[in-house]
Image: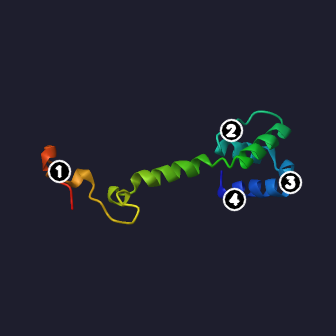
Amino acid sequence: MKMEDNKRISEAFENGTLHQCKVDELKNYLRSVCQPVSGKKNELVERVAGALRLRLQNVNTVVHDDRVEFERPEKERLLTPVGEELTHPSYIDKWISDVTMISRSK
């Protein structure tokens, strides 16, 4: 479903004119948010209204966001809350398993 179609459905919901949308538009919206598409038009309108009230996201948007997050460089993920950059463990080549080498900084 195109973003324009989602916007049209959202605007119709806000304006109280969701019942004026075509059945195909309602079904396409419901498919985009992984909801059942069976039933009469009144049922579809109620289901779309419920999905909009719950702010269900378009599946394609969620998949895209997940893909972007997954493909983000590892280096970028290792930032402290204050913005300090940490070395990713996979880039450290001299690991020492001897815990006696750990010292406290004063």
Return the disc, 1 or 4, that comes first in the chain's sequence.
4
Label 1 sits on residue: 102
Q: CA distance from mark 1 to mark 4?
A: 58 Å
Return the disc, 1 or 2, that comes first in the chain's sequence.
2
- Of badges 1 and 3, the one in the foreground is 1
Question: Label 1 crowding class (10 Å Cα cut-off): few <14, some 14-19, many 20+?
Answer: few
Return the disc, 1 or 3, that comes first in the chain's sequence.
3
Q: Position of residue 24 (x, y in %)?
A: 76, 44
Q: Tell me the number on the disc at residue 16.
A: 3
Q: CA distance from mark 4 to mark 3?
A: 18 Å
User: In the image, what residue type sits under mark 4?
Assistant: Glu
**Secondary structure state at the residue bearing disc 2:** loop
Q: Residue at x 51, y 52 (%)?
A: 64
Question: Label 3 crowding class (10 Å Cα cut-off): few <14, some 14-19, many 20+?
Answer: few
Q: Residue at x 81, y 48 (%)?
A: 22
User: In the image, what residue type sits under mark 1?
Assistant: Ile
Q: CA distance from mark 2 to mark 4?
A: 19 Å
Q: Quadrant of residue 23?
A: top right
**Secondary structure state at the residue bearing disc 4:** helix
Q: Tell me the number on the disc at residue 35.
A: 2
- Of badges 1 and 2, the one in the foreground is 1
Label 4 sits on residue: 4
